[in-house]
Image (cartoon, coloured by chain):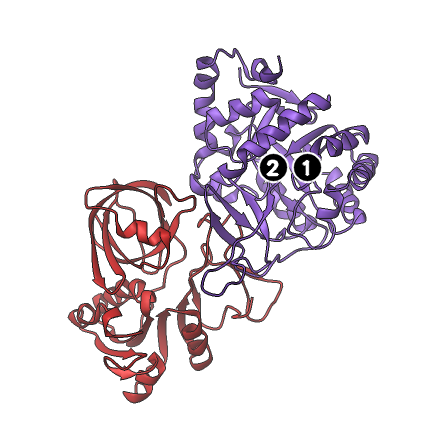
Amino acid sequence: MLDIKLPGLDLKNPIMPASGCFGFGREYAELYDLSILGGIAIKSATIEPRFGNPTPRIAETPSGMLNAIGLQNPGVDKIIETELPFLKQYDTQILANVAGASEEDYIEVIKRLNDCPEVHAYELNISCPNVKHGGIGLGSDPILAANITRMAKAVATKPVWVKLSPNVTNIVEIAKAVEEAGADGLVLINTLLGMRLDLHSAKPIIANTTGGLSGPAIKPIAIRMVYQVYQAVDVPIIGVGGITCAEDVLEFLYAGASAVQVGMYNFVDPYICPKIIEQLPTVLKKYGCKSVKDAIGRSHV
Amino acid sequence: MIVSKDAVLGNVEIAKDTFEMILRPQHMPTILPGQFVNIKLDGFMLRRPISVSSVNHNCYKIIYKVVGDGTKALSKVKKGQILDVLEPLGTPFPIDDLDEVLIIGGGVGVPPLFEVAKQFRDKQTKVTVVLGFNDKESMFYEDDFAFLGCDVYVATMDGSYGTKGTVLDAIAEHNITIDTIYSCGPMRMLEALNQTYTKGYLSFEARMACGIGTCMGCVCKDSKDKQLYYRICKEGPVFPIGKVAFEC
């Protein structure tokens, strides 16, 4: 009922934690068996280790939060050496998020991960608004986005998913360009660029000045973008943005997502993914869906 | 760490804008001195990380200052309400075998040090306590530390009680020479202590999203190796003095 087969990802259910909200699973593995998850989008890998941005990196907002972590990660080699062997013990699908400051960085990370059987598919992070060079440029321009997709596809031995930025005028244009360049699937959306100011100092709360907005506040935007893109492309979509319950998952499926990622709500309720997986069959049944597949794109029928 | 439904047994103002709350978990976990809990509040997205001030066999206390909307909402929580809490979190203060120890607390950094003092006194360690506050109205727990058998000194910035000035002014005035410190308080105080002392532990405060080590929101750098970082919620909030860089 919950299973869904997607490029590179043979999911037992459509629920996976989103990249950056689950690390490499270690903290959550202390709480529950990660094998119950459909998949895990692991934290962005870059070619060099990255410390990330200065602190504060976090600010609360109405129904959400801003973050400017800055792709902190130990670097792809260390991830291959210590994190992938840890994840190997779990029966779940690994979507490796790939980031970089230049196109060459992405390609190098993919080349190194190609030989890792623990990784089932790639998720190109062309949208992270936190990195001053690279990320934002690639995701906001259809030509640059298509170009990095084509380059990734040329070297990747596993399916390539492209995670799109919502900080664009026309998401459909970018989605079509990326599809045409050979993307096996699309992940949308990443965080929205936002800002908060401290009332005492009149300065930004986040040291990086701006941050990415996530949480329930962005769910209607994510739903709208999945809905629009679903009508324009043929490749499958993984929906992300503000999911807090099984009903939210159903809404994304209706809009056209084939699977979903749960992001910041893992911070609020560390058991949210297992809870959603448990509740999803009941919610599907309640609204007359025989399966996940049966619900995908229902709003377009 | 567990996700618990904690019953609020009390929530009273003990000093200016400073509240003491008593919480009783369904199943009391082992909470060590310096550890914190992460509290979910209706109407707020992120949990509020607050350090535990003392532990009993079936309940624990927290002390917090109202500084924003979240802590304001926490101050309105009534006795009998149930709160969703992640507990306990973080690396505690080790209660080492020492003949004597100096505890230095600043403002709402004072609370976690109370359980530290209690456990040292249980081991017959001689405990000297120096507490710093903005003014007399903000002061709390002087008598509680004294009741444990600690020698207690107070500094207030405006001089309305005890030594006028900082905790370091009080330490100088009373000629306190104990060299092992356990401290928690504002960054500037911790930085000054980090320059003055070489033995002991400091506990840090930070903005956190998850509180369990995943989000990388609360990281700090190692004082020597700039490639090495720590998560304040996981490897901290307690660090050996000198371990953490103050610029980030």
For label 2, count other residues whose C-alpha is less than 10 Å away and answer few (under 14), some (14-19) or many (20+).
many
Q: Quadrant of residue B104?
A: bottom left
- Label 1, on which residue? A164
Say which residue appears at 51% left-offset and 63% top-offset.
A202
Q: Is residue B172 left or right of residue B228?
A: left
* Amino acid, disc 1: Leu
Q: Is residue B53 above or below residue B143?
A: above
In which quadrant is the C terminus of chain A drawn? Answer: top right
Q: Nearer the viewer, residue B33 or A105?
A: A105
Q: Is residue A165 above or below residue B124?
A: above
What color was chain A assigned in the picture? purple
Q: Is residue A76 left or right of residue A219?
A: right
Chain under callout 2: A
Say which residue appears at 66% left-offset and 42% top-offset.
A167
For label 1, count other residues whose C-alpha is less than 10 Å away and answer few (under 14), some (14-19) or many (20+).
many
* Amino acid, disc 2: Ala
Q: Nearer the viewer, residue A212 or A170?
A: A170
Is residue A92 at least partly visible in the picture?
no
* Residue B162, position as x, y percentages in the image: 24, 81
Is residue A227 at least partly visible in the picture?
yes
Q: Which chain is red?
A: B
Residue A289 tag number: none
- Label 2, on which residue? A41
Say which residue appears at 40% left-offset and 47% top-offset.
B47
- Earlier sequence position, callout 2 versus callout 1: 2
